[in-house]
Image: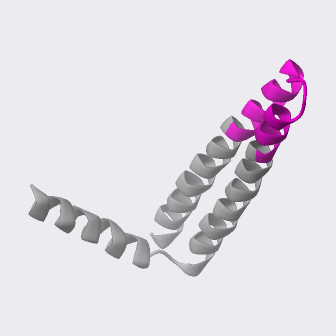
Amino acid sequence: MERNLGKNIEKIFSAFRKIDNYPKAIIKYGAIAFLLLFAAGTGLVVFNHTRLGVDAYLEFVANSVIKNSFTVLAEVVIGGLLFDYIFKK
Protein backbone atom coordinates (compact mmCIF):
# COMPACT_ATOMS: atom_id res chain seq x y z
CA MET A 1 0.00 0.00 0.00
CA GLU A 2 2.74 2.45 0.97
CA ARG A 3 4.74 1.60 -2.12
CA ASN A 4 1.78 2.28 -4.44
CA LEU A 5 1.02 5.57 -2.70
CA GLY A 6 4.58 6.74 -3.17
CA LYS A 7 4.54 5.80 -6.85
CA ASN A 8 1.23 7.59 -7.38
CA ILE A 9 2.48 10.75 -5.70
CA GLU A 10 5.64 10.63 -7.80
CA LYS A 11 3.51 10.32 -10.97
CA ILE A 12 1.49 13.38 -9.92
CA PHE A 13 4.65 15.41 -9.27
CA SER A 14 6.19 14.37 -12.57
CA ALA A 15 2.99 15.39 -14.38
CA PHE A 16 3.06 18.80 -12.69
CA ARG A 17 6.70 19.26 -13.71
CA LYS A 18 5.72 18.83 -17.37
CA ILE A 19 3.24 21.74 -17.32
CA ASP A 20 4.16 24.71 -19.50
CA ASN A 21 5.27 28.01 -17.99
CA TYR A 22 2.06 29.98 -18.60
CA PRO A 23 -0.28 27.54 -16.82
CA LYS A 24 2.28 27.26 -14.00
CA ALA A 25 2.16 31.04 -13.64
CA ILE A 26 -1.64 30.98 -13.59
CA ILE A 27 -1.64 28.38 -10.83
CA LYS A 28 1.12 30.17 -8.91
CA TYR A 29 -0.58 33.56 -8.87
CA GLY A 30 -3.95 31.95 -8.20
CA ALA A 31 -2.48 30.23 -5.15
CA ILE A 32 -1.14 33.58 -3.97
CA ALA A 33 -4.60 35.12 -4.41
CA PHE A 34 -6.06 32.21 -2.45
CA LEU A 35 -3.61 32.76 0.39
CA LEU A 36 -4.36 36.49 0.52
CA LEU A 37 -8.12 35.96 0.57
CA PHE A 38 -7.83 33.18 3.12
CA ALA A 39 -5.61 35.32 5.36
CA ALA A 40 -8.02 38.25 5.09
CA GLY A 41 -10.99 36.07 6.01
CA THR A 42 -9.11 34.50 8.89
CA GLY A 43 -8.06 37.92 10.10
CA LEU A 44 -11.67 39.07 10.05
CA VAL A 45 -12.75 36.02 12.06
CA VAL A 46 -10.02 36.57 14.64
CA PHE A 47 -10.81 40.28 14.84
CA ASN A 48 -14.52 39.57 15.26
CA HIS A 49 -13.95 37.06 18.05
CA THR A 50 -11.35 39.05 19.99
CA ARG A 51 -13.17 42.35 20.26
CA LEU A 52 -15.86 42.85 22.88
CA GLY A 53 -18.98 42.04 20.87
CA VAL A 54 -19.36 39.46 18.13
CA ASP A 55 -21.05 40.87 15.05
CA ALA A 56 -23.10 38.31 13.11
CA TYR A 57 -22.79 40.25 9.85
CA LEU A 58 -18.99 40.43 10.09
CA GLU A 59 -18.91 36.72 10.89
CA PHE A 60 -20.97 36.01 7.76
CA VAL A 61 -18.70 38.16 5.59
CA ALA A 62 -15.56 36.54 7.00
CA ASN A 63 -16.89 33.02 6.43
CA SER A 64 -17.93 33.97 2.89
CA VAL A 65 -14.45 35.28 2.12
CA ILE A 66 -12.87 32.07 3.42
CA LYS A 67 -15.25 29.85 1.41
CA ASN A 68 -14.75 31.91 -1.73
CA SER A 69 -10.97 31.71 -1.38
CA PHE A 70 -11.20 27.93 -1.75
CA THR A 71 -13.43 28.40 -4.79
CA VAL A 72 -10.83 30.69 -6.35
CA LEU A 73 -8.10 28.12 -5.71
CA ALA A 74 -10.12 25.30 -7.27
CA GLU A 75 -11.03 27.37 -10.33
CA VAL A 76 -7.46 28.49 -10.89
CA VAL A 77 -5.95 25.01 -10.55
CA ILE A 78 -8.56 23.37 -12.76
CA GLY A 79 -8.42 26.23 -15.27
CA GLY A 80 -4.62 26.14 -15.43
CA LEU A 81 -4.60 22.38 -15.98
CA LEU A 82 -7.31 22.60 -18.66
CA PHE A 83 -5.45 25.45 -20.34
CA ASP A 84 -2.30 23.34 -20.41
CA TYR A 85 -4.14 20.26 -21.70
CA ILE A 86 -5.98 22.13 -24.47
CA PHE A 87 -3.04 24.09 -25.82
CA LYS A 88 -0.49 21.25 -25.70
CA LYS A 89 -2.33 19.44 -28.46
Residue 59 on the magenta segment = yes
Look at the picture and state if 59 lies above or below 8.
above
Quadrant into which the C terminus falls = bottom left
Figure colour scheme: one colour
Q: Is residue 13 left or right of residue 79?
A: left
Q: Is residue 32 magenta?
A: no
Residue at 69% of width from left, 64% of height from top? 32
Main SS of the magenta part reads helix
Instruction: Tell me: 82 left or right of 5.
Output: right
Q: Position of residue 26 (x, y in %)?
A: 65, 67
Residue occupying the point 27% across, 65% down: 9
- Point out the stretch of residues depicted in magenta: 43-66
Q: Position of residue 14 (x, y in %)?
A: 33, 75
Along the viewing direction, whichever of 38 and 49 lies nearer the viewer:
49
Q: In the rendering, at what x and y percent does residue 16 appear?
A: 42, 71
| Residue furthest out toward the top | 56
Mark count? 0
Figure check: 24 above or below 40:
below
Q: Is residue 62 above or below residue 6?
A: above
Q: Residue at x 10, y 64 (%)?
A: 3
- Viewer can see residue 18: no
